[in-house]
Image (tube, rainbow, N blue to C red):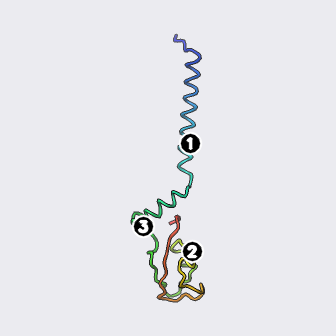
C-alpha cells in the first residue's frame, strides 16, 4: 500500500479544482458577447466572408417600406444613415439607400 503525503493530496485536490474552474471559465467565455464580436462580424461581412441578406447599396422596390427593408436587411438605422430621406413615409420605388447591417445577420 502506497501512502500519500497529506500535502500531495491537498495539491492534487487544488489542481483538480483549478482545472474545473478553468474549464468552466472557458465554456462561459464562449457564450459571452462583446463589442469586439460585432467589430469582427462587420469586418467579415465587408470581406465577403459572411453572406448578407442585402447589398450595401439598396434600391427600393414596389410595395416596400423602410420598416420592411429594415427587417429584411437587418438595419434598424436606415433613416439616420440616409440624410436624403426627409420623410420616412415618402419612400418610392427606385429610391437608393445605404444599408449597414447589424451583427444579427
Quarter-wise, where is residue 43 in the image? bottom left
| In this rendering, the label closer to the viewer, 2 or 1 | 2
Q: Mark 3: few, some, or many residues within 10 Å (few <14, many ≥20)? A: few
Who comes first in sequence, dot 2 or dot 1? 1
Locate residue 49 relative to residue 63 in the image: left or right.
left
State the SS at label 1.
helix
State the SS at label 2.
loop
The span from disc 3 to disc 1 (Cα, nearest Å) is 31 Å
Q: Residue at x 57, y 74 (%)?
A: 77
Q: Mark 1: few, some, or many residues within 10 Å (few <14, many ≥20)? A: few
Q: Residue at x 59, y 16 (%)?
A: 6
The span from disc 3 to disc 2 (Cα, nearest Å) is 18 Å
The span from disc 2 to disc 1 (Cα, nearest Å) is 35 Å
Residue at image mark 1? 25
- Please tell me the numbered disc located at residue 92: none
Q: Report x, y in % for residue 49.
A: 40, 63
Q: Report x, y in % for residue 67.
A: 58, 79
Quarter-wise, where is residue 20 in the image? top right
Q: Report x, y in % for residue 68.
A: 56, 79
Residue at image mark 2? 77
For the residues bearing labels 3 and 2, Cβ distance under 8 angstroms: no
Q: Is residue 7 above or below residue 24?
A: above
Looking at the picture, tell me which residue is in the foreground, 69 or 79.
79
Who comes first in sequence, dot 3 or dot 2? 3
State the SS at label 3.
helix
Looking at the picture, tell me which residue is in the foreground, 88 or 65.
88
Looking at the picture, tell me which residue is in the foreground, 83 or 105.
83
Locate residue 49 relative to residue 2 in the image: left or right.
left
Quarter-wise, where is residue 35 in the image? bottom right
- Please tell me the numbered disc located at residue 46: 3
For the residues bearing labels 3 and 1, Cβ distance under 8 angstroms: no
Amino acid at each position: 500500500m502506497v501512502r500519500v503525503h497529506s500535502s500531495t493530496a491537498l495539491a492534487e485536490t487544488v489542481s483538480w479544482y483549478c482545472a474545473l474552474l478553468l474549464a468552466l471559465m472557458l465554456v462561459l467565455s464562449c457564450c459571452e458577447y462583446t463589442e469586439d464580436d460585432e467589430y469582427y462580424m462587420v469586418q467579415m461581412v465587408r470581406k465577403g466572408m459572411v453572406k448578407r441578406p442585402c447589398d450595401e447599396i439598396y434600391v427600393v422596390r414596389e410595395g416596400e417600406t423602410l420598416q420592411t427593408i429594415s427587417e429584411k436587411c437587418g438595419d434598424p438605422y436606415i433613416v439616420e444613415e440616409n440624410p436624403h430621406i426627409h420623410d420616412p413615409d415618402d419612400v418610392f420605388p427606385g429610391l437608393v439607400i445605404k444599408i449597414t447591417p447589424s451583427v444579427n445577420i
